[in-house]
Amino acid sequence: MYKIGLTGGIGSGKTRVADMLAQWGASVVDTDEIAHTLTAPQGAAMPAIEREFGPRALTADGALDRAWMREQAFSDPQVRLRLEAIMHPAIGQETERQAAAAAGSYLVFVVPLLVESLPRWRARLDRICVVDCDPETQVARVRARSGLTEPAIRRIMAAQAARASRLEAADDVIVNDGATTPEQLRAQAKTLHDRWLALAGTTDRQALSQAGTPE
């Protein structure tokens, strides 16, 4: 199956783009959604997180206390590494499970930190698409949806790959800055969807030809 890696900084709008692609027939595996499921109440990662960090890492309903963990990770890089040691294998396993079950016209992996882990992803992807956004718009969007302070948002942004690094890794770019209308965003996504459909069809025909199977 043809594989797209979809990424972008926090607040860039990559989830909105992924939702459009899914509506048009792509299979979507969202690693951020997987992480949230793993750390929800009764989530599969929560027992290991509680063992590692104690009950202070949990909210009253048993989910990961993201605000507490965020503060700990920013003040001590080792905390982030300890959390990643729990989360990365669990996310990887569920990502593989969902990818194996995918049956869409092509497969989209939504990976917020794709560029940060590019060596692990580059070989398994046919193309990388970056949803690009200026920093001020990122801050405004995240503040509106999350209530985080601007300094907290900028700390998150600083921990992500630089905008230039994402664009350098991109095969395709969707611009979704403050001047982009919903119609313009949809048109960009549809243009790439059609292009990827054509590329996926070409790849499928090549595979059939190499296998000696009549089309």
Image: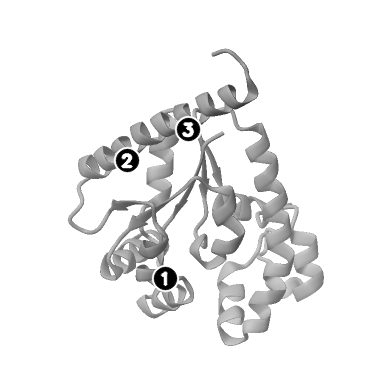
Which class describes the residues within 10 Å of circle 1: few (<14), some (14-19), or many (20+)?
A: some
Check contact, mark 3 vs mark 1: CB within 8 A: no
Q: Amino acid at mark 3?
A: Ala
Report how far apart the C-alphas of labels 1 and 2 lie in the structure: 29 Å
Few, some or many residues within 10 Å of mark 3 (<14, 14–19, 20+): many
Q: Is residue 3 left or right of residue 97?
A: left
Does residue 187 appear to the left or right of 49 in the view shown?
left
Quadrant in the picture for residue 61: bottom right
Find disc 2 in the rendering and name its residue. 189
Residue occupied by mark 3? 26
Residue at screen point 58% across, 13% down: 214
Query: Could you tell which of marks 1 and 2 lies nearer the N-terminus?
Result: 1
Between marks 1 and 2 in the image, the one whose residue lies nearer the viewer: 2
The first of marks 3 and 2 along the sequence is 3
Picture residue at 57% right of the left edge, 56% below the top: 121
Residue 137 drawn above or below residue 28: below
Amino acid at pointer 2: Ala
Instruction: Look at the numbered disc 3 and give the secondary structure of its residue.
Output: loop
Viewer-proximal residue among 203 and 109: 203
The residue furthest left is 179
Q: Give the amino acid at mark 1.
A: Leu
The mark tally for this picture is 3
The residue sitting at 27% across, 54% down in the picture is 176
Q: Nearer the viewer, mark 3 or mark 1?
A: 3
Marking on residue 148: 1
